[in-house]
Amino acid sequence: MAQSLIRNVDVLIVPEAGECHVAEAQDIHLTDSVITAIVPTGTPPPATPVEVIDGTGLLAVPGLINSHTHSPMVMMRGAAEDLSIDDWFNQRIWPMEVNLTPERVRVGARLACAEMLLAGVTTFVDHYFHADQIAQAAIETGIRADLAPTYFSSAGPEAIDAAIATTRELATLHPRITASLGPHATYTVSDDDLRRTADVARAEGLRIHLHAAETDDQTQASLDKHGVTPIEILDRTGVLDAGALIAHGCGIRDTDLPILARYADRTTVATCPKVYLKLAMGNGTPVKQLHSIGIRTGIGTDGAAVHNTLDVWESLRLLALTQKHQQNNAEWMPLSDTLSLATRHSAAAANQPTTLGVLEPGRQADITLLDLSAPHNQPLHDPRAALVYSVRASDVHTVLVAGEVVVRNRQLTKLDLAEVLADARSLAHTLVDLSQGSAIQHYAP
């Protein structure tokens, strides 16, 4: 067993309940991929460490988790701007996705993994096509991923069979890869296909990751067409019973809350606040109401085709600000609550609530070390305030995933960044080409 040590580092402590705080001058002891002890600096280690990382002047936080994204969409960054949500899908994104190939997805996923690691993200929860290629990029770069192969009912039974088979394969592929079933949404996947998905999930112990009640307009359209909300569809098809990560949920109605409360032990919601602002989607995820019924809420970026970055620091900052504005209450979403969403809640959204999200013995050694010495963080009256409102991706100094250093002194250790960028630039134009004149789907919820 390999012993390693992060020496003399300040550590963000995120308790199950109560205020987050920073423990100063600590040593973090690691054995292979697991944290074994966090003790005051200078406490003798149980064995001579193979590697010692000097954490002097740095703050250790749990590796960030991107709770919902479509990582290869970095290849469409900046190619669909200033559009309504209908036109964003129908005039840009779904016509562009006709151009997807395994190679283009892999190249995009490598760029996404590089961007996330350099920003302190150690796990991403993905929902996209050619998920086997995303898995290979994650394995190569050293990041952790939960992958949901996307499918529409319009693609036909064989495509759904293939996506489910890919989920099964990914679930046993690598220790850092987990997998979920990935029906796209309640308005693009039929009730029968959702029921089948739920049956597979229950039988095989899989989780379901899908979009639902993304906007209030979607919810109203569902009521007008079917007489039920998207959440009621998830209930009657067994998706909630099987266990689900719901992306967005901005259109969740008060009448949906008692339904969701029955499944609070197996339901999480991912919120991506920048997207709701940019696409004018309404009030955003009803975080306060969800928390009142015990639903955990993780923080994500969605795809960079709309979010423009995969920067979770940006997302958590916008979440705190938009929630205060939504509730008209400056005391709502305080620092500790925001940090809990970015750590413990996001670990639940990644379907790993007991292994990720906290720096404590027994947890996976997914650790981000931050340098808060830059002018935008100084003077440092409260490190928690800096984490929520000041920190930038460029403050990330060192990153470990499963105890392995994947970013050292702001440099990737397992990737040639210049090569990754060159590959993405060489292929990006092929992905945003609209000359095909078709689309993978039509947005009309």
Image: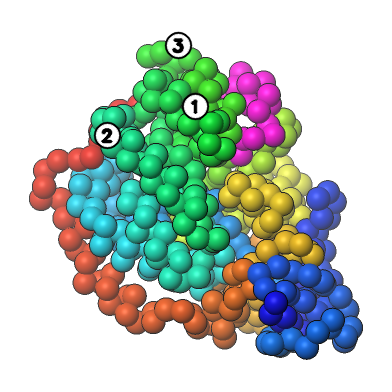
Mark 2 lies on residue: 158
Is 117 above or below relative to 321?
A: below
The answer to whether residue 21 shows anywhere in this view is: yes
Query: Residue 250, image x and y in percent?
Result: 52, 34
Mark 3, Cα crowd under 10 Å, few <14 / some 14-19 / many 20+, is few
Mark 2, Cα crowd under 10 Å, few <14 / some 14-19 / many 20+, is few
Looking at the rendered structure, the kind of residue marked 2 is Glu
- Residue range in magenta is 252-268
Looking at the rendered structure, the kind of residue marked 3 is Gly
Residue 240 position by quadrant: top right
| CA gap, disc 3 and disc 1 | 24 Å
Looking at the rendered structure, the secondary structure element under dot 3 is loop
Mark 1, Cα crowd under 10 Å, few <14 / some 14-19 / many 20+, is some
Mark 3 lies on residue: 227
Q: Nearer the viewer, residue 234 or 379?
A: 234
Looking at the rendered structure, the kind of residue marked 1 is Asp
| CA gap, disc 2 and disc 1 | 17 Å
Mark 1 lies on residue: 199
> Do the residues bearing badges 3 and 1 touch, measured as CB atoms within 8 Å?
no
Residue 387 position by quadrant: bottom right
Query: Residue 342, image x and y in percent?
Result: 65, 55
Query: Residue at the spot x=35%, y=59% of the render?
Result: 133
Query: Residue at the spot x=61%, y=47% of the render?
Result: 351
Q: Which sits earlier in the primary sequence, circle 3 or circle 1?
A: 1
